Amino acid sequence: MKKKAGLCLILLGLLLDPAGAVSLDLAPQAKASLQIQGILPQLVGNRLTLQIRLPPQAHVYAVHLPPGLGPQPSQVILEPAWVVPAKNLTEQPPQQLYDQAYETRLLAHEGDFWVQVRLAEPPKLPLRGVFRYQICSQTLCSLPLDAAFEVK
């Protein structure tokens, strides 16, 4: 019961923190921050590549997940509010991890990885957007979060 109450407080904290930074009470003495540590966009012609860095002991779900599973697949959303279809996204080959939160094997990224968007034509600058992701530790997952980026 104590774990369920703690998880409810964590989820409430996610809803109340508009910046997306999440501090989780994993144990009375231990705290961890679950958020992307860095995102670097690079545009070459009509290909936008996002280099993404995660904190240790964390993972985000792949862009291409089998349908019907619970976690949120990663997405790229470009302004004005255009969700890039998964068919237009490629990603560094994800790892198959056993996810304790969902109690199954899933495709996910750890550490540093990239996601690439194939656009119909080179875009006008500045190009703005967000990388939408669900980040997890071994036992807890955030709600979907957004990491903003801009190419000038």
Image (cartoon, helix red, strand yellow):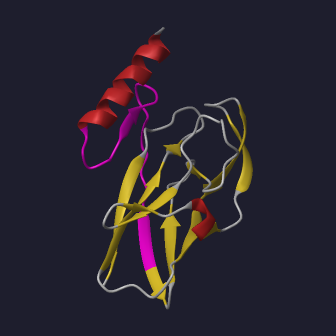
The answer to whether 103 appears left or right of 86 in the picture is right
Q: Is residue 21 visible?
A: yes
Span highlighted in magenta in the image: 17-41
Q: Nearer the viewer, residue 141 or 133?
A: 133
On the image, which quarter does residue 64 sit in? bottom right
Residue 102 lies, with reference to residue 71, above or below; the image says above
The image position of residue 107, as x and y in percent, is: 69, 50
The image position of residue 33, as x and y in percent, is: 40, 45
For image coordinates 46% across by 30% down, the residue present is 26
For image coordinates 71% across by 64% down, the residue present is 93
Residue 6 lies, with reference to residue 21, above or below; the image says above
Q: Residue furthest bottom?
A: 45
Q: Nearer the viewer, residue 68 or 60?
A: 68
The image position of residue 152, as x and y in percent, is: 30, 85
Residue 56 lies, with reference to residue 2, above or below; the image says below
Q: Residue furthest front?
A: 120
The answer to whether 120 appears left or right of 18 in the picture is right
Residue 60 belongs to the span the image colors magenta: no
Q: Residue furthest top?
A: 1
Main secondary-structure element of the magenta-colored stretch = loop
For image coordinates 50% across by 57% down, the residue present is 75
The image position of residue 24, as x and y in percent, is: 40, 34
Q: Nearer the viewer, residue 14 or 117?
A: 117
Q: Is residue 111 visible?
A: no
